[in-house]
Image (tube, rainbow, N blue to C red):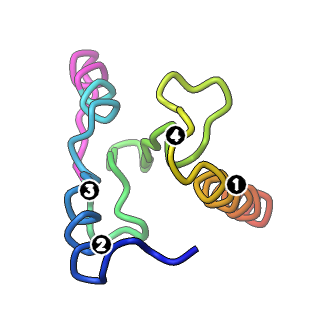
Amino acid sequence: MADVHDKKTRSYNMSMIRSKGTKPEIMVRKFLFGNGFRYKLHDKMLPGKPDLVFPKYKTVVFIHGCFWHGHDGGKYFVVPKTHTQWWLEKINRRKEKNIFKTSKTA
């Protein structure tokens, strides 16, 4: 399916989608901080720039949204009403890619 926007408009639209400071991320951060966990945010020195880094525990946390990952039963996963087939294919490719990554590293 051809894009309905030119490259410049698509780039602008995508740049407006936040990758840091999302509601799920803020909720997790507040919960952890309130329970005494201290962390670093989005450490650029680590692969994938994890959302939360706990140096004391040598642990990282990635907070993924329901929409982009198509979580089954996810509260925020709703199939868009326009270009439905295209979106379903895109989200299913993402799910397959994640399954492949998980199974390959496990």
- The crowding category of the residue bearing disc 2, from other C-alpha atoms within 10 Å (few below 14, some 14 to 19, many at least 20), is few
User: In this view of the protein, which residue sits in the foreground, 87 or 19?
Assistant: 87
Q: Is residue 32 magenta?
A: yes
Quadrant containing the C terminus in the rendered view = bottom right
- The crowding category of the residue bearing disc 3, from other C-alpha atoms within 10 Å (few below 14, some 14 to 19, many at least 20), is some
Mark positioned earlier in the residue sequence (3 or 1): 3
- Distance CA(mark 1)–CA(mark 4): 17 Å
Q: Position of residue 68 (x, y in %)?
A: 51, 48
Q: In the image, which residues are magenta?
A: 30-41
Mark positioned earlier in the residue sequence (2 or 3): 2
Q: Check disc 1 and report the residue beneath it.
A: 92
Q: Check disc 4 and report the residue beneath it.
A: 81
Does dot 2 land on a helix, a strand or a loop? helix
Q: Position of residue 24 (x, y in %)?
A: 34, 31
Does dot 4 land on a helix, a strand or a loop? loop
User: In this view of the protein, which residue sits in the foreground, 7 or 55?
Assistant: 7
Residue placed at 37% from the left, 55% from the top? 50
- Distance CA(mark 3)–CA(mark 4): 33 Å
Q: Where is residue 16, by image quadrant?
A: bottom left
Which of discs 1 and 4 lies nearer the camera? The answer is: 4
Mark positioned earlier in the residue sequence (1 or 2): 2
Q: Check disc 3 and report the residue beneath it.
A: 42
Residue placed at 23% from the left, 50% from the top? 41
Which of discs 1 and 2 lies nearer the camera? The answer is: 2
* Label at residue 41: none
* Label at residue 10: 2
Name the residue type under label 2: Arg
Q: Position of residue 7 (x, y in %)?
A: 30, 83
User: In this view of the protein, which residue sits in the foreground, 18 or 105?
Assistant: 18
Image: 95 above or below 56: below
